Image: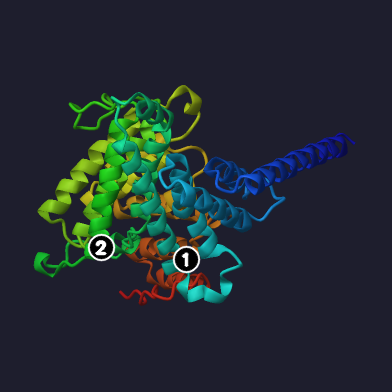
Amino acid sequence: MIYLELNNTRRTFLAQQKKYRDETEFIRKRCVDLEPNNAGYWSNLAYLHYQNVHELGPRGRKDGDIRNETDQALEYLDRALSIDPRRITDLYRKGYLLVEKLPHQVLYGRRDAQHQQNRPETANQCIRQGIDCLSQAIQVWESLLSADRRQNEMRQRDRNDYIKSLYHSGHGYYKLITNDWKEEVYALERSGVTPENEISYNAKDLENAESAWKYFYQCWLKDGLDRADLSEPSSNSTPSNGIFEGVHRLYWLGKVSFVHYWILSGHGQKDTAEAIKNRNKAEKYLVAALELAWSPKSKSQKKDFIAELLVRLYISKGEYDKAIEIINKHRGRYLEPYISHTLALALSLSGKYAEAQDVLDEALQSRGNKEIWMTHFLKSCAYSREGHHDKANESLNKANEEAQKAGRKGFNIQRFSD
């Protein structure tokens, strides 16, 4: 009975909210009908759909089509920007949608199913267009003169969108990097076997990593700091508060530095001097992110995702016991599957095979495990290291089967032998 009452109350509330949205849309459309050359009216109409994009999704409202709302928001933002191309907030919102929202819809939405093979490139095109919009927002804001009263007011008004444009530009460039972490490099002991003169990498990946670093560094500097004499990010020089959490700003500097290492080392194949330099930088920022307190509004958040990346770093250095210590210190009762994989890899490399298998068995039971094939693969590697080759090949067969189901056509590891 109580459940039915709550359900009815919720339905009534949602119906009322929809009525308000419909009325707002009607009024704002009437405004653009009356004054079609008013950029502000188009912007207000776009913002209604921009809000809908944020509210719709797995954990939000279910009474709308997120792709349609995204397309509508982008269409109206374009109308506003065609009238006044220097609107910082509209440039930011358009860039944000293209970098953070539309690519996911392109990759996984039903609308683009007929263009399956072109999805990744289409998503990357969206990201590049979004970065261009965010760059324009940054350039317009930085061109405003603080000595001019009106322009200084605009600088103050749009400063938050300027900082958010820096952050999402960095995130956009990071998304364009194709070099992923590969557990098999260490699980199959391929690290360090390639001569340095044979190490190769995608130059575009390196360029994107450098651009990501530049924007995340500027975000770190401007968000709550904005002092020219600060050149070294650390937990002591980073405030917890800001447009973005200080913890997140340090984390992203560490994350980009680590991918820099990963690219320069040829996916972990060889620790060149330049690669090690970037790995050391990554370690410093990730440790700082772990040390820095969350702001009061985020104090309940966990830091296991930071610890997991630091564990990858320690695995690349061969410091397995340190890796295990870090992740156990910051883990909760429940481990996300990707964290389980990293922890199990460190345990297996340190010779703690039974513990590694226990962690992986828990990951197999997780409904949120999107990489079951990796779980089986790591189990097979742990069995092989322990000398149980029959069990290793049994798990490896499961890994290859699951990889094929998931469309991982490139994953096909040969059987283990004595």
Q: Amino acid at mark 1?
A: Trp
- Circles 2, 1 touching at the beta carbon (< 8 Å): no
Q: CA distance from mark 2 to mark 1?
A: 29 Å
Residue depicted at x 48% and y 61%: 371
Q: Which residue is mark 1?
A: 373
The answer to whether residue 127 is left or right of residue 114 is: left
Q: Secondary structure at mark 2?
A: helix
- Front-most of 87 and 210? 87
Nearer the observer, disc 2 or disc 1? 2
| Depicted 208 relative to depicted 247: above or below | below
Q: Residues within 10 Å of mark 2 (few under 14, many from 20)?
A: few
Can the viewer see residue 355?
Answer: yes
- Residue 269 percent location from the top left of the image: 20, 62
Nearer-the-camera pick, 61 or 166 = 166
The answer to which image quadrant residue 11 occupies is top right
Q: Which residue is mark 2?
A: 204
Give, as a three-letter code, the residue at label 2.
Lys
Any part of residue 366 in sight: no
Identify the coloring: rainbow
User: Can you give x and y, in whole percent of width and height, for residue 232 in the image?
Assistant: 20, 32
Whole-percent x, y for residue 79 in the image: 53, 52
Q: Which quarter of the rendered picture does the C terminus lie within?
A: bottom left
Q: Residue at x 19, y 58 (%)?
A: 264
Residue 75 horizontal side relative to residue 169, left or right: right
In-front residue for pair 160/263? 160
Left/right of residue 106 with respect to residue 25 in the rendered view: left
- What residue do we see at 51% from left, 74% from top? 116
Q: What is the quadrant of residue 191 in the picture? A: bottom left
